[in-house]
Image (spheres, rainbow, N blue to C red):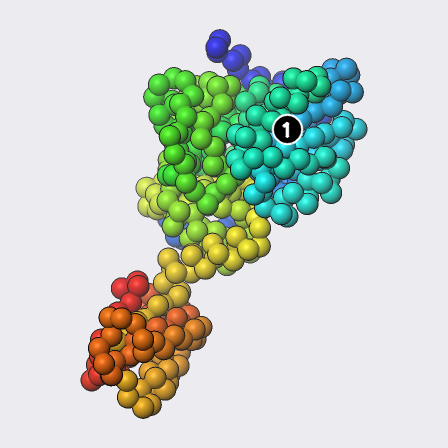
Amino acid sequence: MQPMPPLTSEEIHEAEAALRGIIHRTPVEFSRSLSELAGVEVWLKCENLQVGGSFKIRGAYTRMVRLPATARAAGVIAASAGNHAQGVALAARELGIPAIVYMPEGAALPKVAATRDYGATVRLVGSTVDEALEAATAEAAATGRTIVHPFDHRDVVLGQATLGTEILDQVPGARHVLVPAGGGGLLAGIGAAVATGSGPRPQVVGVQAVGAAALPESLAQGRPVPLSAMETMADGIAVGCPGAVPLDFISRTVDGIMTVTEEELSRALLLLTERAKLVVEPAGTAGVAAALRGAGNWSGPIVAVLSGGNIDPLVLTRILRHGLVDARRYLHLRIRARDTPGHLARLLAQVASSGANVLSVDHNRTAPSLAMGEVEIAIEAETRGPDHARAVIDGVRAEAGIAGEVRTDQF
């Protein structure tokens, strides 16, 4: 395809004017805790507080407000697992456009419910967004409705660029902007907005989950290259192939791509919840995870974009638990010992006296690996961090040492 014409500051200002009264100018918050961990000033662009819980309404509304009257009357169709679905539904409600949103059958129930509550007709089809998009495309071709793609359209990139101009205005001295990236629309928009700015410009870095990182190879080959496999808990950036339109912008305006692990994402989510008091979905934590991964090597200030806050409470519980394990706040002990009266009580008393909080206990006498008269005791406890966890282990070893062995999952 032909290279996209660059976005101009005039176009972005027009998009901002169209969005005025529709979206929030989301705050930028300084985080002292994250700054100390990263070794540089860290500011959080809180798009998780946006209308609909993510940045997606910016691109969806900009795309739809620019449709001709006949296309608006015919209606729009979208496919999404969550955030784009809500953005399209909200934009359609504001503009009075009938909207149908196809979602995978396994989409999170809160996201399905929110999309319906915003006024869209929801159809659950297939097991993936790609299957939902195939069904949506077929209906669009049959009915004349317009497909509102989540990232692969210039008007969508234009809408996301409005977030970039807010960052430039709110943190004028920023040296790096860290942006979660999936299909590339948000990253392309912020890169394009920064490119229109005057004076020294911050470096824009896209951040992908290591299990869903399609951008590096696509940029290397100069075309969208689909992943052969993909696995990440960060569903908001779990996109197997970037869009051709955003890829073109990214190749010209973005300074680099980083990847972060699942452990780094869960740790960032935990820190944002615990220290910044912000609820952020896994995809939205990618910039913070990148800031912490490069601790000591960044020049600041850094702006980490929190791209969304729509997370199923059940998923939040699992990820917070994973983050607590990674931060050594949960300790898993397995003690193999002689099955003598009072031994379990003494072990639990030792754990309690160390200040740890016992969450669960499993007392197993029937495992095939146990010898006659042996028992395996599994204890899960809550600790205050690595140093406290080691102290708990030392105390348990002292208590269990005369009768068995102690193993842990973390140390």
Q: As drawn, is 286 to the left or to the right of 18?
A: left
Residue 264 versus residue 5 in the image, above or below: below
Q: Quadrant of residue 338?
A: bottom left
* Residue 373 in the image, given as x and y percentages of width and height: 24, 83
Q: As drawn, is 101 to the left or to the right of 287?
A: right
Residue 86 versus residue 309 in the image, above or below: above
Q: Quadrant of residue 106?
A: top right
Q: Taking the image as drawn, is residue 339 in sight?
A: yes
Q: State the quadrant of the C terminus.
A: bottom left
Q: Nearer the viewer, residue 312 or 328?
A: 312
Q: Which residue is mark 1?
A: 78
Q: As drawn, is 133 to the left or to the right of 329?
A: right
* Residue 51 in the image, given as x and y percentages of width and height: 67, 40
- Secondary structure, mark 1, is strand
Residue farthest toward the bottom in the current orientation of the protein: 341
Q: Residue at x 54, y 30 (%)?
A: 131
Q: Residue at x 41, y 40 (%)?
A: 231
Residue 164 versus residue 346 in the image, above or below: above
Q: As drawn, is 44 to the left or to the right of 335?
A: right
Q: Taking the image as drawn, is residue 51 in sight?
A: no
Amino acid carrying label 1: it is Ala
Q: Residue at x 38, y 50 (%)?
A: 263
Residue farthest toward the top in the current orientation of the protein: 2
